[in-house]
Amino acid sequence: MARRDHSFICQSCGAVYARWQGKCEACGAWNTIAEEVAVAASVPAAQRSSRKGRAVVLEKLEGTAKPAPRLVSGIGELDRVAGGGFVPGSILLIGGDPGIGKSTLLVQASAALATGGQRVVYVSGEEAVDQVRLRAQRLGLEKADVGLAAETNAENIIATLSGGPPVHMVVIDSIQTMWSDSVESAPGTVTQVRTSAQLLVRFAKQTGACVILVGHVTKDGQIAGPRVVEHMVDAVFSFEGDGGHQFRILRAQKNRFGPTDEIGVFEMTGRGLSEVANPSELFLSNRDAGAPGTAVFAGMEGTRPVLVEIQALVAPSSLGTPRRAVVGWDPNRLSMVLAVLDARCGVRLGGHDVYLNVAGGLRIGEPAADLAVAAALVSSLTGAPLPADAVYFGEASLTGAVRQVSQAPARLKEAAKLGFAGAVIPAGGLDGVEAPVAVTAVSSLAELVAGIAARAPRRPAMRETRSPSGRDATPRAVAHADWPEDEGR
Ligand code: TYD
Ligand code: MG
């Protein structure tokens, strides 16, 4: 009898099983299935009567009531990612590694909104009131009129918020610590987190308060515990960065009220997070211009151009399967660029270890980085430094052609603003727009490779490359004439 009230739920994705098993078939995670007391039917008995449904009034898309204005914190980078401020009645989730600065960001946002006259409540489930106060003091924000509570029970929180004048914004730090009386599972389990989140979603929709949930992130970058929470909220932001760098990036992964490709850039200082208005300057500082293997990529993050240095290191490998290590870019994309360089340009890297790094800790998702990556790889292989004052962008196709990418004029304008004099871009990408820098148009990767090889101080190591099987790779015809002469072989 009692057994039927128990179910086995994957703590990672929320899939439900009748009995325990080692691996969750839904998300593939191991050892994430835990026994939980089943949720009582979510609709209370009183509402489950056999009455007929009540007809609701259908509305027009065009309403007469003016929507409530967005809550603008004044922290520009945060407001932009949110789509121009927080929407009243919305609920959003901010995920990030421990110690990345989520609490700091939200204390600063709370204080900014409270100073702007909004009623803000900050509920900490992880820290005591004194600890939150200490942080506020350190940030110089202790004067801001923010309501503070250390509480983990969702019903208590909602009761607190419902009494008194309406609240505009509530921060719940973090959702994993919340629990509800209505379910019996232990705090932190999927059922508890989901139920607490549901209660808070209902509170947000009913009262028009904006609720911000903090969520922890697992090693592989997913918001820990239930992915289900991601479906329940209006927006999911991730706060990224790594311990070795002082800057942090807020990225929208889902946003029902704004764009999802915007980023906000912050710098962690001794007095909290400060906004970085011009990220390119930050990412290009400490550049080792003139060293082989580095190329500046002119990328776009949402509506903003961002210049960043791509570093490649290509070294002969002693391993049977050479190493491919990538930081900040998609490893599959690197494999693709390597394959295209091999098949279409005769650049053989099968016997080399390849390391690729996006300087400064930025993570790039754009295929437009292909050209910059290829340039950095060939530059490292040949020892030919790329021109220090040129930027690169363009997408590589499997045929070896270089494809046009969007927003070329904006990328070039940013490059000119930061003092770059040249750009290597896909042919025809400008559509007749006059470029603010000297443009070298390339239509294929082979053309790019030829251009770099012409600058090589030493004979490129390409034709020495042995295939992993140990047999000499057949020398290949290289698709250009000005390749340095093969001497001594
Ligand atoms: P925190 O906001 O507590 O991270 P999270 O809530 O994401 O776990 O930030 C903790 C880190 O931020 C901590 O390592 C110290 C650093 N920090 C600063 O460098 N300057 C500051 O002013 C503050 C408040 C924190
Ligand atoms: Mg915290």
Image (spheres, rainbow, N blue to C red):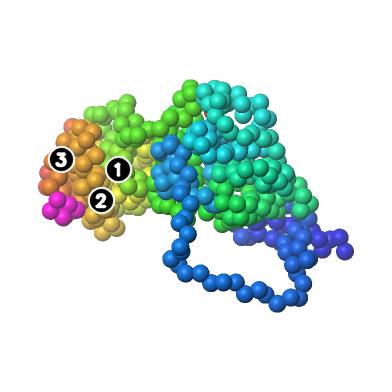
Which percent across, then down, holds residue 84? 41, 46
Which residue corresponds to mark 1? Answer: 305
Q: Does residue 70 lie above or below 284 as drawn?
A: below
Residues under numbered marks 1 and 2 in contact, where contact means CB atoms less than 8 Å apart: yes
Q: Quadrant of the C terminus?
A: top left
Disc 2 crowd rating (10 Å Cα; few below 14, some 14-19, many 20+) is some
Q: Residue at x 48, y 23 (%)?
A: 271
Q: Quadrant of residue 377?
A: top left
Q: Does residue 122 lie above or below 27 as drawn?
A: above
Farthest residue in the right direction? Answer: 1
- Asked if residue 248 lies left or right of residue 158, the reply is left
Q: Amino acid at mark 3?
A: Val
Q: Residue at x 79, y 52 (%)?
A: 184
Between the residue at mark 1 and the residue at mark 2, the CA separation in whole angstroms equals 9 Å
Disc 1 crowd rating (10 Å Cα; few below 14, some 14-19, many 20+) is many
Give whichever of discs 1 and 2 has the lower sequence position. 1
* Residue 244 appears in the picture as rendered: no
Residues under numbered marks 2 and 3 in contact, where contact means CB atoms less than 8 Å apart: no
Q: Amino acid at mark 1?
A: Pro
Which residue corresponds to mark 2? Answer: 407
Which residues are the magenta region? Answer: 429-433
